[in-house]
Image (tube, rainbow, N blue to C red):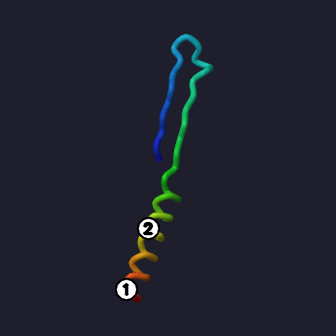
Amino acid sequence: MIRYRKQNLNDPEQDSEIAVDLTPFIFIAAGYIAVKVLLRTLD
């Protein structure tokens, strides 16, 4: 998970945080590579 936090020192209530979870992208990429390798072995 990647987190980015922006702090506003003048007004702490306006602090913002963005969190990105990369787990689904890793599974999709691994599945795509696995299918590509499988199809290449069938040829």
> What residue occupies the far right of the structure in this picture?
13
Query: Is the residue 14 above or below the residue 17 in the image?
Result: above
Question: Residue 31's spot in the image, x, y percent?
Answer: 47, 70
Q: Secondary structure at mark 1?
A: helix
Task: Specify the amino acid type for callout 1.
Answer: Thr
Mark 1 or mark 2, which is nearer the start of the sequence? 2
Question: Residue 12's spot in the image, x, y percent?
Answer: 57, 17
Crowding around mark 2 (Cα neighbors within 10 Å: few <14, some 14 to 19, many 20+) is few
Query: Is the residue 36 above or below the residue 8 in the image?
Result: below
Q: Are marks 2 and 1 in contact (CB under 8 Å)?
A: no
> What residue occupies the far bottom of the structure in this picture?
42
Question: Residue 27's spot in the image, x, y percent?
Answer: 48, 64
Query: Is the residue 15 above or below the residue 17 in the image?
Result: above
- Identify the residue at horizontal 46%, vertical 43% (top origin): 2
- Taking depth in this image into account, of 14 and 33 the one nearest to the observer is 33
Question: Residue 37's spot in the image, x, y percent?
Answer: 39, 78
Residue 40 placement, left or right of 13: left
- Give the mark count: 2
- Identify the residue at horizontal 52%, vertical 45% (top origin): 20
**Pointer 1 residue:** 41
For the residues labelled 2 and 1, the Cα–Cα distance comes to 17 Å
- Taking depth in this image into account, of 43 and 10 the one nearest to the observer is 43
Task: Specify the amino acid type for callout 2.
Answer: Ala
> What residue occupies the far top of the structure in this picture?
10
Q: Secondary structure at mark 2?
A: helix
**Pointer 2 residue:** 30
Residue 14 placement, left or right of 34: right
Crowding around mark 1 (Cα neighbors within 10 Å: few <14, some 14 to 19, many 20+) is few
Quarter of the image with the C terminus is bottom left
